[in-house]
Amino acid sequence: MNKEELVKEIKQLEDKVDQLRKSVPIHSPKVSMMQELEELEEKLEAKKKLLGQIEIKK
């Protein structure tokens, strides 16, 4: 995976996280929505770490 692909994936994940956060009700959010949000945030964090490692190597 190259840097450009990784940046694109990060942007897509950020958009998904943002959309999901906006759709989660403030009161009584569904457990499934919160789990999905947590999973997306974990994937996003992992991709950002990978991007950081790629940038450090250059």
Image: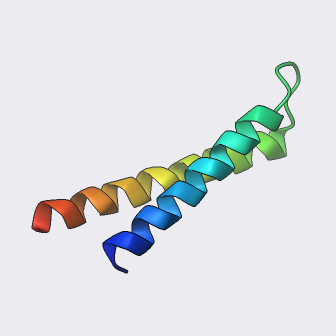
How many marks do you count on the picture?
Answer: 0
On the rendered structure, is 49 left or right of 8? Answer: left
User: Above or below — where is 44 with respect to 7?
Assistant: above
**Along the viewing direction, whichever of 56 and 42 lies nearer the viewer:** 56
What's the residue at 49%, 65% (across, down)?
Answer: 8
Residue 21: x and y, percent? 72, 35
Tell me where residue 23 sits by quadrant. Answer: top right
On the rendered structure, is 45 left or right of 40? Answer: left
Residue 13: x and y, percent? 58, 55
What's the residue at 38%, 54% (across, down)?
Answer: 48
Q: Is residue 43 among the parts visible in the rendering? A: no
User: Above or below — where is 2 with respect to 29?
Assistant: below
Q: Is residue 16 among the parts visible in the rendering? A: yes
Residue 17: x and y, percent? 64, 45
The N terminus, quarter of image? bottom left
What's the residue at 19%, 61% (across, down)?
Answer: 55
Residue 58: x and y, percent? 11, 68
* Colouring convention used in this rendered image of the protein: rainbow
Residue at the top extreme? Answer: 27
What's the residue at 87%, 37% (across, down)?
Answer: 30
User: Above or below — where is 28 with respect to 49?
Assistant: above
